[in-house]
């Protein structure tokens, strides 16, 4: 009887341990993807994420179909849907790759024990992180809160395994299964924007799906990796991998990225960026409320004023009068992506010059980034805000004009995205800096350093 492979944040065929194990089991495979907007605690996807998901699932579905495997699409609470598909398909085994956010873990562990007690074989695999969170521990048996020792500890573990090749999926029984199990169509899910259709910039910028992810990795390693260390901080250099949405959706695995980079002579810097991704996910694993609660509790005393709606709007729309901030926010709106250095500058501007709570900025990025993920986004916002793990000290306040001079010295990036923006500055950098430091004093005085 069939093996059910439940796809989640792993929309790929190569280096997919759950799929490979299903192929080795030798029975027909039914693949499943669930749009779960019902289970308790699931964070609703942002609009840019929904756009990416639509196209990535479309690509996966076509590629699995070419290999004789039906991808069934269903909407609903995952626990209910998986049980229904097991019944409808007669599957006797259910395989998936692990997830690390808390609501998802609760769903998975409840299902695993429930299905096992019904006599099914259930297996979960490590696929989305290079190191499982519970394997990286301090000498005292706790998790790390500082990156450098965390990454050193990771590197002392056995090296990340080699990526698995594409499994052989063709099975004579697959067609029969395909007929039994009904599927939604992608159109039923309304993931794409209609009126207005704001996704033209996303379509121009990206090709979601596994083949394009591998093409980009190959191209990056061949042409950009040698320049990465020197040029990664310049937003106009185009020297970074642009792999983040592909890793977010699992079109490519971190193992593939790791080995492609090390095989090409590597860049310790690039590998350590993959390490920051691990660190963010491990932090979420041990601190599930990362998107809503300050990691450093003393920041609960931060006296956020009532957010200035006009300033917030100017920030979102890229109308602050600070070229690099406006360029970043416009790049984000147009492409669903923003260069890392500029993410830091725009986030710092919101939190420290506009004194707007990091959670409001995090939510905007969540909605507009194609790579928004449950760990990296809140983790990095908290890093900028000073409330996070191994965070930038609060009092180190970026000056967007000096940052622009340093990282966009010829103004190419600002030219590209904000040439027509107004130079009318919405705040005074000196005064707002003072106000931010004054607010931070309350945190310091609260007596919990
Ligand atoms: P590269 O420089 O090529 O890096 C390679 C990979 O390493 C990235 O694809 C990413 O997976 C990982 N990586 C690099 N830097 C970080 C980092 N600081 N934290 C975690 N992973 C990292 N990244 C996301 O993937 N999703 C997010 O939602 C996200 N939100 C962010 C919010 C803020 C405020 C900031 C400052 C950063 C955020 N980042 C996020 C991290 C980083 O900006 C992006 O990963 C990076 O810009 C993606 O571009 P790239 O793939 O070309 O990066």
Image (spheres, rainbow, N blue to C red):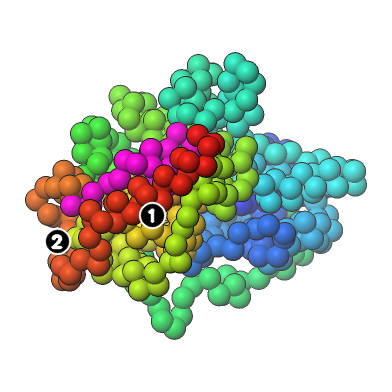
Rendering coords of residue 328 (x, y %):
28, 58
Callout 1 crowding tier (Cα within 10 Å): few <14, some 14–19, many ≥20? many
Callout 2 crowding tier (Cα within 10 Å): few <14, some 14–19, many ≥20? some
Q: Answer left or right for 370 relative to 92.
A: left
Query: Mark 2 = which residue?
Result: 415
Q: Say whether residue 122 is magenta.
A: no
Q: Is residue 264 visible?
A: no
Query: Mark 1 = which residue?
Result: 351
Q: Quadrant of residue 139?
A: top right
Q: Answer left or right for 12 relative to 351.
A: right
Stretch in magenta: 383-401
Rendering coords of residue 343 (x, y %):
34, 51
Rendering coords of residue 138 (x, y %):
58, 20
Rendering coords of residue 175 (x, y %):
69, 59
The first of marks 1 and 2 along the sequence is 1
37 or 61, which is in the foreground?
37
Q: Is residue 432 visible?
A: yes
Q: Answer left or right for 329 relative to 428.
A: right
Q: How many marks?
A: 2
Q: Give the farthest residue toward the left.
A: 410
Q: Say whether residue 395 is magenta.
A: yes
14 or 44, which is in the foreground?
44
37 or 72, which is in the foreground?
37
In the rendered view, tell whether residue 395 sits above or below residue 333.
Answer: above
């Amino acid at each position: 009887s069939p093996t059910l492979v439940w796809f989640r944040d792993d929309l790929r065929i190569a280096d997919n341990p759950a799929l490979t194990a299903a192929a080795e089991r030798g029975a027909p495979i039914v693949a499943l993807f669930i749009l779960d907007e019902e289970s308790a605690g699931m964070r609703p996807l942002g609009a840019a994420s929904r756009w990416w998901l639509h196209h990535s699932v479309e690509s996966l579905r076509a590629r699995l179909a070419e290999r004789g495997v039906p991808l069934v699409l269903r909407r609903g609470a995952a626990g209910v849907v998986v049980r229904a598909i097991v019944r409808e398909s007669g599957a006797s085994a259910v395989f998936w790759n692990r997830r690390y956010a808390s609501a998802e873990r609760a769903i998975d562990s409840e299902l695993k024990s429930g299905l096992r007690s019904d006599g099914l074989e259930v297996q979960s695999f490590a696929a989305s992180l290079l190191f499982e969170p519970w394997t990286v521990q301090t000498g005292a048996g706790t998790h790390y809160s500082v990156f450098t020792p965390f990454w050193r500890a990771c590197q002392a573990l056995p090296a990340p395994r080699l990526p698995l090749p594409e499994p052989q999926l063709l099975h004579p029984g697959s067609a029969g299964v395909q007929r039994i199990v009904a599927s939604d169509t992608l159109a039923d899910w309304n993931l794409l924007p209609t009126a207005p259709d704001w996704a033209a910039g996303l379509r121009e910028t990206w090709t979601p799906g596994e083949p394009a992810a591998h093409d980009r990795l190959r191209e990056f390693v061949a042409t950009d990796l040698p320049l990465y260390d020197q040029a990664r901080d310049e937003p106009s250099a185009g020297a970074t991998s642009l792999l983040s949405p592909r890793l977010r959706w699992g079109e490519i695995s971190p193992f593939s990225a790791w080995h492609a980079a090390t095989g090409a002579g590597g860049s310790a810097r690039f590998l350590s960026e993959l390490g920051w991704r691990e660190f963010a996910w491990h932090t979420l694993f041990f601190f599930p409320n990362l998107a809503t609660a300050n990691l450093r509790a003393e920041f609960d005393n931060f006296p956020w004023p009532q957010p200035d709606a006009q300033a917030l709007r100017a920030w979102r729309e890229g109308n602050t009068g600070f070229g690099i901030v406006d360029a970043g926010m416009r790049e984000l709106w147009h492409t669903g992506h923003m260069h890392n250095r500029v993410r830091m500058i725009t986030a710092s501007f919101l939190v420290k010059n506009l004194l707007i709570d990091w959670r409001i900025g995090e939510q905007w990025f969540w909605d507009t980034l194609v790579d928004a993920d449950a760990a990296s986004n809140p983790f990095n916002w908290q890093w900028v805000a000073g409330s996070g793990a191994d965070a930038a000290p609060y009092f180190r306040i970026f000056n967007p004009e000096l940052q622009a001079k340093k990282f966009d010295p010829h103004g190419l990036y600002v030219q590209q995205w904000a040439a027509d923006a107004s130079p009318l500055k919405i705040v005074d950098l000196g005064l707002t800096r003072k106000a931010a430091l004054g607010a931070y004093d309350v945190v310091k005085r609260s007596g919990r350093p």
